[in-house]
Amino acid sequence: MALLRAKDVAKMAQKEREEKLKELKMELIRAGVTANKSNAKTKEIKRAISRLITFSKSARKELNKK
């Protein structure tokens, strides 16, 4: 899995972000993550998920302002 950077997320369309989010969540499930288990791969997946969610929320706020 490649790193997902903020500038890459900014270039994505909303639909692409939603698809990527679903894909990352499924990958996290496949990794068999439990609350106490954490390694570098799961940590990066969780970071990518949080980036996508954060960017989506901020994009929605900007649309609501207009």
Image (cartoon, helix red, strand yellow):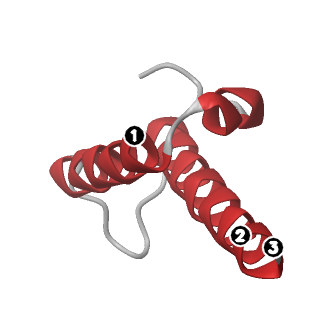
Give the percent coordinates (x, y) of residue 44: 56, 41
State the quadrant of the N terminus: top left
State the quadrant of the C terminus: bottom right
Lower sequence index among marks 1 and 2 = 1
Numbered-mark total: 3
**Residue name at image x 21 percent, y 57 percent:** 29
Name the image quarter holding residue 3. Answer: top right
Question: Mark 1 or mark 3: which is in front?
Answer: 3
Mark 2 Cα within 10 Å, few/some/many (few <14, many 20+)? few
Mark 1 Cα within 10 Å, few/some/many (few <14, many 20+)? few
In contact (CB < 8 Å): disc 2 and disc 3: yes
- Circle 3: element type: loop
Q: Which residue was labeled with disc 1?
A: 16
Answer with left or right where residue 40 lies relative to residue 36. right
- Circle 1: element type: helix
In contact (CB < 8 Å): disc 1 and disc 2: no
Q: Which residue was labeled with disc 2?
A: 63
Answer with left or right where residue 39 lies relative to residue 3. left
- Mark 3 residue type: Lys
Residue 34, label in figure = none
- Mark 1 residue type: Glu
- Mark 2 residue type: Leu
- From mark 1 to mark 2, how far is it between C-alphas? 18 Å
Name the image quarter holding residue 60. Answer: bottom right
Q: Which residue was labeled with disc 3?
A: 66
